[in-house]
Amino acid sequence: MMKRSIFFVAIAILFIFNIICIIKITKTTNAQKKIFHLYENMSNVQSFLINNISDSFKFDDQKMKSDIFLYTDSHDSIHISNVFKNGKKLIFRYTVGSCESCVDQEIEYLQKIFAKNPDDVIILTWYENQRDFIIFKRKHQLKLPIYNVKNIGINHAGNNPFFFMSDSTLSAKLYFMPMPFFSQLTLSYLNTIRERFFYEKQFD
């Protein structure tokens, strides 16, 4: 009797297993398509990351022009050398041709991470229309120093916004170009810069 019960239980288990297999097989085609699309996307992401890393090596060690003047929202001018009197600075560069939502996002991160020491950061932008420059500053209620300057002397890829470290030598170091949809990379970069170069100031 027990053997017969075991036999029927085994048959039932096999039957259920076969049904599960059939369901899995019918879903295989769709699953394969999804896997293929995911792989395709991952390949694109990998290429994007490789290109970005390659670009960072290209732009490191370039120098900003030593004869440029930066302009405030009230159109006062300051020589580029004067902004580094207190040491190293993190530079964020964008222009009106940059992706607006991307710039807004980076500004938000900067203001959050460097809230206690805004003078460690300098934003360099370029607006032909002074009014647009003023509107941008008011829109973000910027506490970070921001200046208007057409050409800083560093060549970069298109209108993409980018970060770099600099000092009185005006050399670009630790170049970083933010990547859309990879905000964690930007946050990691900014936190690393703050901890590496401005750690002591966090406790002033």
Image (tube, rainbow, N blue to C red):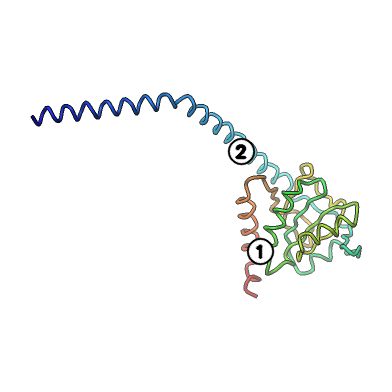
Q: Is residue 162 left or right of residue 130?
A: left
Q: Which residue is mark 2?
A: 45
Residue under numbered circle 1: 197
Q: Is residue 164 left or right of residue 129?
A: left
Q: Position of residue 10 (x, y in %)?
A: 20, 28
Q: Where 51 sits versus 136, above or below?
A: above
Q: Amino acid at mark 2?
A: Val
Q: Position of residue 78 (x, y in %)?
A: 88, 64
Which mark's residue is nearer the viewer, 2 or 1?
2
How many badges with numbers are in the image? Answer: 2
Residue at (57% x, 36% y) in the render = 42
Q: Quadrant where the C terminus lies?
A: bottom right
Q: Amino acid at mark 1?
A: Phe
Q: Nearer the viewer, residue 148 or 1?
A: 1
Q: Position of residue 124 (x, y in %)?
A: 81, 56
Left or right of 28, for residue 47: right
x then y, percent, for residue 1: 8, 29
Q: Which residue is located at x 67 percent, y 45 percent?
A: 180
Q: Residues within 10 Å of mark 1 (few under 14, many from 20)?
A: some
Task: Please say if the residues under marks 2 and 1 sit with CB atoms less than 8 Å apart.
Answer: no
Residue 78 versus residue 143: which sits nearer the camera? Answer: 143
Q: Residues within 10 Å of mark 2 (few under 14, many from 20)?
A: few
Distance Cα–Cα, label 2 vs label 1: 30 Å
Farthest bottom residue?
204
Could you say which quadrant of the image residue 45 lies in? Answer: top right
Mark 2: secondary structure = helix
Which residue is drawn at the image coordinates 62% and 59% (left, top)? 191
**Residue furthest out toward the left:** 1
- Residue 17, by quadrant, is top left
Nearer to us in this view, 105 or 44: 105
Of helix, strand and loop, which one carries label 1?
A: helix
